Amino acid sequence: MLGHRFAHSLTRLGTETAFEVLAKARKLEAEGKEIVHLEIGEPDFDTPRNIIDAGIEALNGGFTHYTPAPGLPQTRAAIADYVRRYKNVPAAPEEVVVVPGGKPIMFFTIMALCNPGDEVIYPNPGFPIYESVINFVGANPVPIPLREENEFRLDVNELAALISPKTKLIILNSPANPTGGVLKESDVRTIAELVQGKEIFVLSDEIYERLVYNGQKPVSVATMPGMKDWTIILDGFSKTYAMTGWRIGYGVMNKELASWVTKLMVNSNSCTAAFTQMAAVEALNGAQDGPEKMLQEFVRRRDIIADGLNSIPGVKCAKPLGAFYVFPNLKSFGRSSQEIADYLLQEAGVACLSGTSFGAYGEGYIRLSYANSVANIEKAVERIKAALAKINRLSIR
Ligand code: PLP
């Protein structure tokens, strides 16, 4: 065993259990069991054709070399233009840093802003990498609970009570993973008012911004008075354009922070793949029928899965307002989320995630991704129904 010689900070890293559940599910498949995969957070659609063609054209055209660390000028310009047009945030190309996926912006931002002992307020249940990186850099994680009674939106009064002189950063994620909650404009306004004058940054994870089902465009906190320089927008291409494997995302932040995040890029990745950056320009500037079709299909699936789950005795599933996850309440079964998720994988052949994979406030819930075909969603619901009907008669401990 060599671990005693490794850095202590490693023990503070968390993980995304989706990958662990996927490995368990694959093992069962190898043993001959048929599994419906509702654990993975990625669109099951192909990247739209025009984007693939732009990537191929870029490769043929010689985009096979290093690019400037913060991104190609045309990619930064296209992103700044999109951010101005779509998010209504007056971004300049120099305020954009292109990175391999949305995730590096979490890592780089938290690393660039937080000293040991600084407090970071983050959503719980929420994307597990927030808490992981906060702990990794030695900052103090301060969870803000997202409650079903509040449609999984953070409670601004609760947020006000958590802000302290040590608060360095607040992380927002709307639409949210894993709950599908979407902040209201009035919430965003109040959050901006709460941090006003306190020199607190806000990391606004807007990766699911285009996946909203109530017809309302989410409002970025960066549009609020005085907030532009204090907000880091995280966004990307993985979810909107079904480009998870291309690895491209971006951050929009004040120029000073952008130069530090660029330095972190120089020290880690050098740059994002050149052809991927060219495909991203096409994604933003080309036809938008791909994302629009995906959105319509997600609405249909959301209704099928939420209605299906609600028809199961003991299950209560709020209809998510955005993203592509449902977060049903299974507290009535009196088991832990982890036990239920394990049971559903073994008994029903449905791979899903325990709510506690997203933090302690996820206890009592499981997360199912509906980025899967209607036939598979229907099959999963039937199997869950049959398995849960048996659960009280079984000992699953
Ligand atoms: N932010 C949230 C809330 C996510 O759910 C994810 C991916 O699951 C990401 C960011 C990261 O996306 P990417 O694959 O572009 O790194």
Image (spheres, grey):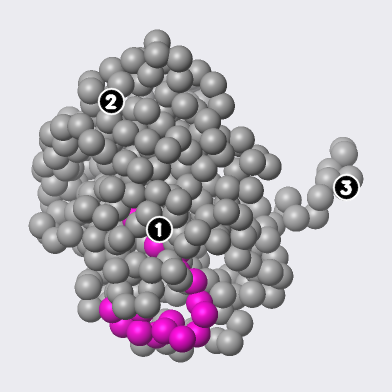
Tell me the element at label 2.
helix
- Vertical placement of residue 255 versus 229, above or below: above
Mark before the other along the chain sequence, 2 or 3: 3
Query: Mark 1 = which residue?
Result: 233
Residue 194, picture quadrant: bottom left
Taking the image as shown, residue 200 lies to the left or right of residue 266, namely: left
Q: Are marks 2 and 3 in contact (CB under 8 Å)?
A: no
State the extent of the magenta-drawn residues as a range: 189-207
Some atom of ligand 1 lies within 8 Å of the CB belonging to the residue at label 2: no
Residue at (11%, 41%) from the top-left corner?
Answer: 296
Q: Give amino acid for label 2.
A: Ile
Horizontal and vertical percent position of residue 196: 42, 84
Q: How crowded is mark 3: few (under 14 residues within 10 Å), some or many (20 or more)?
A: few
Residue at (28%, 48%) from the top-left corner?
Answer: 81
Q: Residue 51 carries which label?
A: 2
Tell me the element at label 3.
helix
Residue at (22%, 42%) from the top-left corner?
Answer: 381
Residue at (58%, 87%) from the top-left corner?
Answer: 165
Tell me the element at label 1.
strand
- Vertical placement of residue 224 versus 3, above or below: below
Horizontal and vertical percent position of residue 390: 31, 48
Q: Residues within 10 Å of mark 1 (few under 14, many from 20)?
A: many
Horizontal and vertical percent position of residue 48: 23, 26
